[in-house]
Amino acid sequence: MRMDAPSEGVEEALEVVAGFDEALTHGFARLAGDQLRDLAGALASTPLGQRAAEAAEKIAAGSVAEEHLTVLAGGRAALLGAVHDALLSQLDTAMGRRRAEYVAGEGRSAAGAGCRSWLAELAITGWKGVDHDLVSASAQPIEALLADPGMRRLAVLLDGLAAELSASCPVATMERLPRRRWADLWTRALLLSQGGWPEPAVEEVSGTLLILGVDVQEHGTAVQVQVHGVLDERLVRTSVTVAKVDTIVGLAVWPLLSGYPKLVRALAEQRAVEVRDLPLLGGGDLVWHEDRVMLKDPVDPFVTARVALAGAVAPAVPPLERHPVRIAEPVLVEGDLSGYAFDRLTPSGPITEDVLKGASACVGLMRWDGGQWTLQPLAVQKGKKKPHNAELALSPKAAKAGEAVTVLKERAGRLLRK
Amino acid sequence: MNADRPAWEQASAERVVAPVQPRKLAKVPFVELADGRLQGVVSSGSDIERVYVSSITAGTLTINCSTNNNRPCGGLRGSACKHLHALRDEAVLQYGVDRVARYLRAEEGALLSGQPEAAPAAMVFSRFLRHLAYLELPESTVPIPEMHWFR
Ligand SMILES: [Zn+2]
């Protein structure tokens, strides 16, 4: 698949974002006026333009209020949303992929106000001023958010950010800063904390889910397994997120999914799944229910990709999720794979750099980061072997690694209920 | 892409913290580099209900060991007890010796060379309980798109 240079405007938008990220690195208490005015300028012709200009002026004048920060975070997200749209449409064109229109539902997301003053403090201080005390101030709001199942997205995001800041303290001594990344996380957290975002529309679907593969996303205290598949000529994803601790890594994440035995078996044994009345969200997310699925015969993901991928309709991306990092488009590549930059190999599976050398086909996810398209392998073909990310999910090695979970749960049972 | 800025600084999904190495958790269920200390919780060899809280402070390398009820460890007399040795060994497995030595600002071979000094055991123990509480959180089948930033 040939990808041309990014469409016009992408570079310019990323330059403006980089300016904002620079301001956030040094803190809005310092002179950040020029960068913030640039951001407001880039939004001038949008509905946010006026308010962004006002927010930039207020902050330049030394008055940093939460509402100004929220407007600017919205502006940064809008720019990256436009970059996302340009990249995804470039990819859709190259793959000849059709994409559904987004339909919003009735519901609105809840607000998580408790963390906003911490996020404001981060912006005022800047990454370079972050120390242990500032990181510690996140513990209480994060704990409160974790206790509320409706706030899981925000809680998991903030917990990941706080752990990185903590490990990087004092940030001033770091040689290089992940400024794009931390600004991304800060921006999304501030926007999520506002609440009121339209929830996607929900429909109930039934049919045969053909699995392409699984993407394992993890940080110290959470792991999300996200399954990509085709259901009735539609591309869908289905996800399970489990909380964990940092010492549960690699193969040990599979036993954490013991509450989802059918899902794990479907993944490990590459089985098709008959689903009945599962909720399908507007963003293409199929909400898994163990009691509404039935396992069928194994189906080779390469066959699924060859037969069902080309004609499948991709889901729309919910407005708040529009960011280049969310691009994870299933693709089948065959023949010479040497032109692809592979990325995001999971330590929970058997696919390593070595395995990829000399592979002749790959079912993977097209991703984009740091100005580059990459391919995240879900399954590869090498000679007669076809290793895939969930291959070891039910292996004795995974069960052994999972003993760590048992040990800690036993400790938790003894100590937490005293 | 602006060539003046390193690509890493303009990437969204780079790993910032190296993942810790898996290790057996029965003897030392909890180890962390936090609050300016290498600190953790060590199981008692004899009493399954009892744990020790052990710590080494960065810079001064002062050491401490007590039970979770704040009784001083009988093995800590001028030099490190077996709990502190276990804490150090497991921390080296978990983080690698470089990261531990850098955090403690000490030579690799001198991590346990400091003198005993009182340190707050209750706080470490409550951090351990908070750590364990993650395993009690309910799973979720609602997608968390923010996890795309993590890998
Ligand atoms: Zn001791």
Image: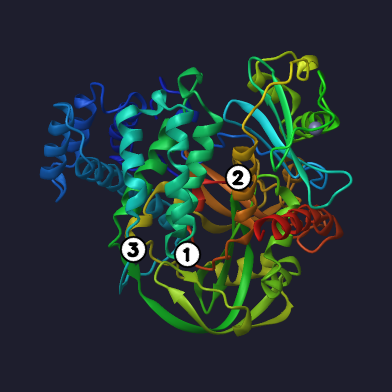
Name of the residue lying farthest toward the right: B46
Question: Looking at the image, is B95 positioned above or below residue A249?
Answer: above
Q: Chain of mark 3?
A: A
Question: Looking at the image, is A25 positioned above or below residue B48?
Answer: above
Residue at the disc numbered 1 = A149
* Alpha carbon separation for disc pair 1 and 3: 11 Å
The answer to whether residue A311 is seen in the rendering is no
How far from the left and from the top, in percent, is residue A137?
Answer: 43, 38
Name of the residue lying farthest toward the front: B71
How far from the left and from the top, in percent, is residue A178?
Answer: 47, 31
Residue at the disc numbered 3 = A110
Secondary structure type for disc 1: helix
Residue drawn at (61%, 66%) of the image? A305
Q: Callout 2, which amino acid?
A: Ser
Q: Callout 1, which amino acid?
A: Pro
The answer to whether residue A239 is seen in the rendering is yes
Residue at the disc numbered 2 = B126
* Alpha carbon separation for disc pair 2 and 3: 30 Å
Q: Quadrant of the C terminus of chain A?
A: bottom right
How far from the left and from the top, in percent, is residue A298?
Answer: 74, 75
Q: Chain of mark 1?
A: A
Q: Chain of mark 2?
A: B
